[in-house]
Amino acid sequence: MSQSTFLRVCGFALIGAGVLTILINLSLTPFLPQHAALADTAASIVFPWRQGASAVAVLLLLFGCVGLYQWQVDKAGWFGTVAFVVAFSGTAMTLCIEWAETFLVRDLAFTAPDALRALDVRHGLGLYDIGTLIALGTFAIGWIMLAASTFRTDRAHWGAWVLIASFFLNPLLGALTHGALPALIVGACLPGSAG
């Protein structure tokens, strides 16, 4: 596969991740039980579809991350390399969380719901919470760093700014910002730059 084809595929992966995230947040997330225990949420009919689709979106981000770094590697320097490693690692850990929730948490909801209820009533953070926070924190920091690296390389300035802003505006703008819109924008830049 040529580098230009690889970059196009990675760009389309980012676009796919953005579109899928928007679709998930508009069509599946609203149907999850609200203010319910984890066991009840995981037992719902929507949960495996939502978590499975989220896992696919994160997998697409993982592929897109590689292409985004490859696109700017000649100008990225040491900061870009560190940004890529952190973004890739955070995305991989987030994929693990999504995958485990799709299958393990769903299975526990039916076979050991009391175990999930115990996670809900526990005081303070448990290992499940800490692991999730590490994954999502690394994901967010890594993608913000990768956006900053992209900005520094004079590539896709507006996509990089939208990505950074999305992490801070997410509580205000909801479904269109948590990685979805930036992935669409940056992904749209990759295929065009490869030719």
Image: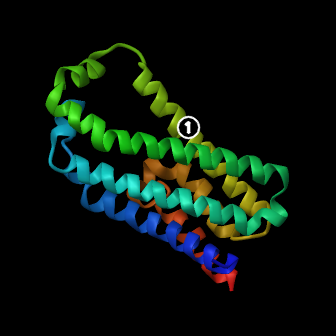
Question: What amino acid is found at the position of numbered circle 1 in the picture?
Answer: Gly
Q: Is residue 71 left or right of residue 18?
A: right
**Residue with the most extreme front position:** 1
Q: Residue at x 28, y 52 (%)?
A: 50
Secondary structure category for the residue under label 1: helix
- Coloring scheme used: rainbow
Asked where in the image residue 192 lies, by quadrant, the reply is bottom right
Q: Position of residue 95 (x, y in %)?
A: 46, 47
Residue toward you, 27 or 62: 62
Residue 117 picture location, percent across and down: 22, 22
Residue 35 in sight here: no
Closer to us: 192 or 95? 95
Most extreme residue toward the bottom is: 195
The residue that mark 1 highlights is 137
Task: Say whether residue 116 is visible.
Answer: yes
Residue 95 shown left or right of residue 189 in the figure? left
Vertical side of 113 occupied by 180: above or below: below
Q: Position of residue 111 (x, y in %)?
A: 16, 29
In the picture, the quarter occupied by the N terminus is bottom right
Q: How far across and down, in percent of the image, does residue 61 sit?
A: 52, 58
Q: Is residue 106 above or below residue 145?
A: above
Above or below, 54 against 39 in this view is below
